[in-house]
């Protein structure tokens, strides 16, 4: 088992990704609102530090917020399908900072019941 993490800066692609997951038989994912460290620094009110001012000029046009999606997948075949869905959804977006993905192996899963 693996968990696939997707940090999606191209948030307009979220619906396409989720519908693609359903088409591929991936029935569960968790979606979190997120913000990268650079964006948090740029949007901080502390502009008196010279580094922050420079970052503000560099990053002011980038995506301030993102979505972090994670899904538990049982095998590598499902990982490949999920990765293909995400790549297809962001294909053609000219922005180089559309996001990134990575997997982490899962040792054990515990269900929480009452």
Image (tube, rainbow, N blue to C red):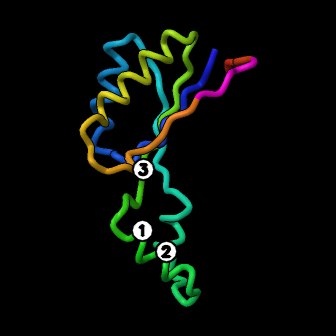
Q: Mark 3 highlights which residue?
A: 66
Q: Earlier in the sequence, mark 3 or mark 2?
A: 2
How much space separates mark 1 and mark 2, taking CA atoms? 6 Å
The numbered mark at residue 59 is 1
In the image, taking residue 94 as reference, residue 84 lies left or right, namely right
Of pointers 1 and 3, the one earlier in the residue sequence: 1
Q: Quadrant of the N terminus?
A: top right
Give the numbered dot on residue 55: 2
Query: Looking at the image, is 104 positioned above or below residue 39?
Result: above
Please identify the quarter of the rendering in which residue 99 is found: top left
Which element type, helix, strand or loop, lies under badge 3? Answer: strand
Q: Position of residue 46 (x, y in %)?
A: 55, 83
> Few, some or many C-alpha atoms within 10 Å of disc 2 (few <14, some 14-19, many ≥20)?
some
Q: Nearer the viewer, mark 1 or mark 3?
A: 1
Task: Please give the name of the residue rendered at 39% of the width and 10% of the height, measured from the top-left corner.
Answer: 25
- Could you say where residue 40 lies in the image, as x and y percent from the top left? 52, 66
Residue depicted at 56% across the width and 86% down the height: 50
Q: Which residues are magenta?
A: 103-107
Q: Is residue 92 left or right of residue 98?
A: left
> x and y percent of residue 76 in the render?
55, 12
Residue in view at x 49 percent, y 83 percent: 53
């Amino acid at each position: 088992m693996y968990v696939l993490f997707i940090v999606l800066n191209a948030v307009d692609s979220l619906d396409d990704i989720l519908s693609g997951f359903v088409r591929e038989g991936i029935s569960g994912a968790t979606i979190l609102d997120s913000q990268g460290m650079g964006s948090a620094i740029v949007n901080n009110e502390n502009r008196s530090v010279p580094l922050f001012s420079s970052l503000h000029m560099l990053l002011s046009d980038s995506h301030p917020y993102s979505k972090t999606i994670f899904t538990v997948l049982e095998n590598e075949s499902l990982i490949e399908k999920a990765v293909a869905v995400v790549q297809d959804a962001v294909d053609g977006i000219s922005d180089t900072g559309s996001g990134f993905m990575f997997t982490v192996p899962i040792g054990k899963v515990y269900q929480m019941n009452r």
